[in-house]
Image (tube, rainbow, N blue to C red):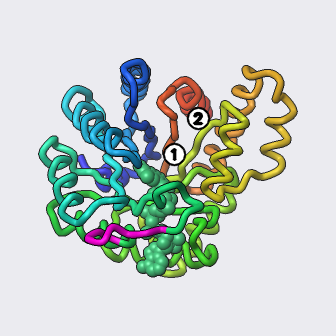
Amino acid sequence: PTIRELLSTGQPSFSFEFFPPKTPEAEEVLWRSIREIEQLRPTFVSITYGAGGTTRDGTIRVTERVAQDTSLTPLGHLTCVSHSRDELRSVIGAYAGSGVRNILALRGDPKGGPSQPWVAHPEGLNHAVELVELVRSLGDFCVGVAAFPDKHPEAADLEADAQVLAVKAAAGADYAITQMFFGADDYFRLIDRAAALGCDIPVLPGVMPVTNIKQIERMAELTGMALPKPVTDRLNAVAEDPAAVRAVGIEIATELSDKLLAGGAPGIHFITLNRSTATRQVFRNLQSAVV
Ligand code: FAD
């Protein structure tokens, strides 16, 4: 099924994001997590597209195996980084060949990370919207895009982010998934801004339970994600105790997800970092709140 169809049921969607592993050990951890997530019968699972050549092959391989060996619906991410149009066409063809019809069309971060200036491949694409158009032109794909409740580092302001989302929707994006964030109000403000521009595609909020304070600080620095003081205060209060950090991280993610769903978000997209335990706990907390 397409994610467009899965999101049209009116039921909240729950999805989980993984990245392609680099070692045999990491591969084992990933597949254990995928099997555990499979039991939760999520709406879909997504596989990120890495910056280096080897993880890119890994994306196709993992996505293909999810499509063929599990009952899960896979979403393959794809970025424009270092690819010509022809190479992008062949990756999209590889997805289609392995039965993957759901693609998340991204520009990708500049080589060297989000702090570097973006440089397009000379025969490639400059913005995600062009990739939406390319994927759409190549067949019957369901296309998702990225959205940013906290400002994208290169965007002039939050209004510009909403405009880019509206342009991507107008080009044929069926839905969006957001960068992870902590402020439910920031998400709803993005939805309101997009709606004011006539953009009403479903926007799935990205949620990651924090299990490691240093890691989340590094991610915030890289992506421009806001780390609200009440969140860091709660985590720092237990910083010496890794189990407590984890418990607080799960609590914060549960509260955020509750607020998002209560306010009308169409579901939650969980970033797992390939370890499913914390996200499964948040998922269970939400289910028990629903029952
Ligand atoms: P775009 O929509 O092209 O936006 C990039 C910048 O250009 C923004 O500042 C935007 O305001 C500006 N812009 C866009 N269109 C125009 C225009 N027409 N005119 C002027 N300015 C414009 N990265 C990976 O490498 N691999 C992944 O698998 C991956 N998965 C992700 C999944 C999600 C859910 C999200 C939210 C992000 C993901 N990323 C991934 C990160 C993403 O690639 C970066 O955030 C990247 O910097 C922006 O990608 P985009 O698709 O939003 O680009």
Q: Which residue is mark 2?
A: 286
Find residue 54 and report its image quarter: top left
Left or right, residue 236 beside residue 207? right
Which labelled disc corresponds to residue 34? none
Is the residue under label 1 in contact with that under label 2 (CB below 8 Å)?
yes
For this rendering, which residue is in front, 253 or 111?
Answer: 111
Cα distance between the residues tagged 2 and 1: 10 Å
Query: Tag 1: residue type?
Result: Ile
Q: Nearer the viewer, residue 20 or 278?
A: 20
Task: Judge: label 2 CB < 8 Å from ligand 1.
Answer: no
**Is residue 272 rendered to the left or right of residue 9?**
right
- x and y percent of residue 251 in the render? 71, 33
Q: Which residues are magenta?
A: 118-125
Please, what secondary structure does the residue beneath circle 2 have?
helix
Q: Quadrant of residue 285?
A: top right
> Callout 1 environment at 10 Å: few (<14), some (14 to 19), or many (20+)?
many
Expressed as whole percent of the image width and height from the top left, the position of residue 192 reads: 58, 72
> Is 285 on the left or on the right of 122, as rendered?
right
Residue 268 is marked as 1
Furthest residue toward left: 97
